[in-house]
Image (cartoon, grey):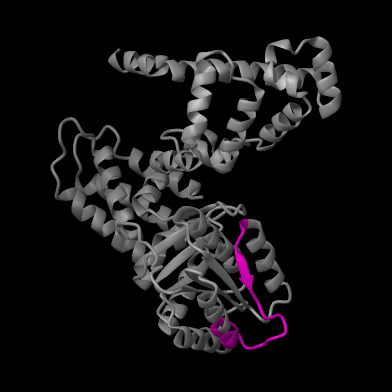
Amino acid sequence: MFENLSDKLTKAFKILKGAGKITEINIAESLKEVRKALIQADVSYNIAKEFCDNVRQNALGQNVLTSVEPSQLIIKIVHDELTKLMGSSSSSINVKGSPAVILIAGLQGSGKTTFSAKLANLLKTKQSKQVLLAACDVYRPAAIEQLRVLGESVGVEVYSEPDAKDPVKIAKNAVKYAKEHNKNIVIIDTAGRLAVDSEMMNEISNLKQTLNPHETLFVVDAMTGQDAVNTAKAFFERINFDGVVLTKLDGDTRGGAALTIRYTVSRPIKFVSLGEKMEALDVFYPDRMANRILGMGDIVSLVEKAQEQYDEEEARKIAKKLRTNNFDFNDFLSQLQQIKKMGSVKDLVGMIPGMGKMVKDTEVDEGVFRNMEVIISSMTPYERSNPEKINASRKRRIAGGSGKTIEDINRLMKQFEQTQKMMKMVANGKAQKMMRNFKQR
């Protein structure tokens, strides 16, 4: 996501590298590259031009401090303008109601059904809400079954009427059912079409007028680029939605929709979806997205993801085991599973400032964790609890049971030992001391 745009913006900023000050000439050359980068990222010409005009005006109006290079100042100004273009700050959804009704709209294939389940999971796990999913797509044959399966996977009840053909009636019955069964929130998954047409617009408009939802979200596939912006505009003119959800941002998308949809419809992007996992749904933060576009990483989101998986009681147990040299393969496996829940390893590494460019062309084998789990699962309880007792004959048996080689077992043993040492340093405070000494040099 945004890799091509990031590369081209970096190239544009290099024009100012080494320049003593910002002038009309060097800023014009740099912004020509910025405008070209935005257009290639599927941003409309008019928006790209206005964006660059704002950057030029801000840049020429500022004095460059002796400690700040012109290229650094431009990066700061571009960051601020990108943030402003995408909405300046994050926006929450309205879930106040008895029950609160959230209406989901969008084209077919945009990911509405999957998003509905992800949102239900997020509201259930992070806000402790009692959520009901309502299957109101009566046209796509597998839609009801898909929502039922997804709802089951996240532990959320799904209301459906498989033989009914009136979405408005189904939705009203779902809200009534929610009230009777003490549900806090009803998420209405609606039908989409392959293109914007009057029949679809009439149906979603009738649903909104009848239900008077507390929140209406428009789901759009970010991979459709500028077409996504045009579709959002058509929906907005008809149903006046409250916010936008961008799906498939982990795909091969140029990013134009994320950059300009807020500007076009004057409605905030509220969520972004970056994968198929039910946990792969994030609140949209314009400033953090600007950081990632400019290759600055997103350390705040990385820390938040880690905190979501952080179990304080478990951490205390691990710390105690490390201090007494009792960290074993059961604990190692637990740590692996927590890391896996955080998402794609490549995406996680890309959130670390300066690491995005290093891993962009690198294939990160997500199967590595799975191989480790297979090997550990082939160990006996005694072996997991006593790693130091795993000798050559035990390695041969583990290799046979897991379908791996002796080299794979040795590699895992080495990784375990390295993790054990690193975590012991953290538990004893040595890592923090080393970092302080490093910073003082």
Task: Please state the horizontal and vertical placement of residue 424, each as a whole percent of the image.
Answer: 50, 16
Is 312 positioned to the left or the right of 140 in the image? Answer: left
Whether residue 204 appears in magenta in the rendering, the answer is no
The relative height of residue 73 versus residue 276 in the rendered view (above or below) is above
Q: Which residues are magenta?
A: 154-172
Residue 416 occupies quadrant? top right
Residue 10 occupies quadrant? top left
Task: Please state the horizontal and vertical placement of residue 57, each as a whole percent of the image.
Answer: 19, 55
The relative height of residue 217 versus residue 92 in the rendered view (above or below) is below
Q: Residue at x 55, y 73 (%)?
A: 181
- From the image, which quarter does the C terminus lie in? top left
Task: Please state the horizontal and vertical placement of residue 67, each as a whole percent of the image.
Answer: 18, 30
Name the foreground residue: 411 vs 212: 212
Whether residue 299 is visible to the viewer of this picture, yes or no, is yes
Name the foreground residue: 168 vs 22: 168
Total tally of numbered discs in the picture: 0
The relative height of residue 105 versus residue 309 in the rendered view (above or below) is below
Q: Residue at x 86, y 24 (%)?
A: 400
Q: Residue at x 37, y 62 (%)?
A: 92
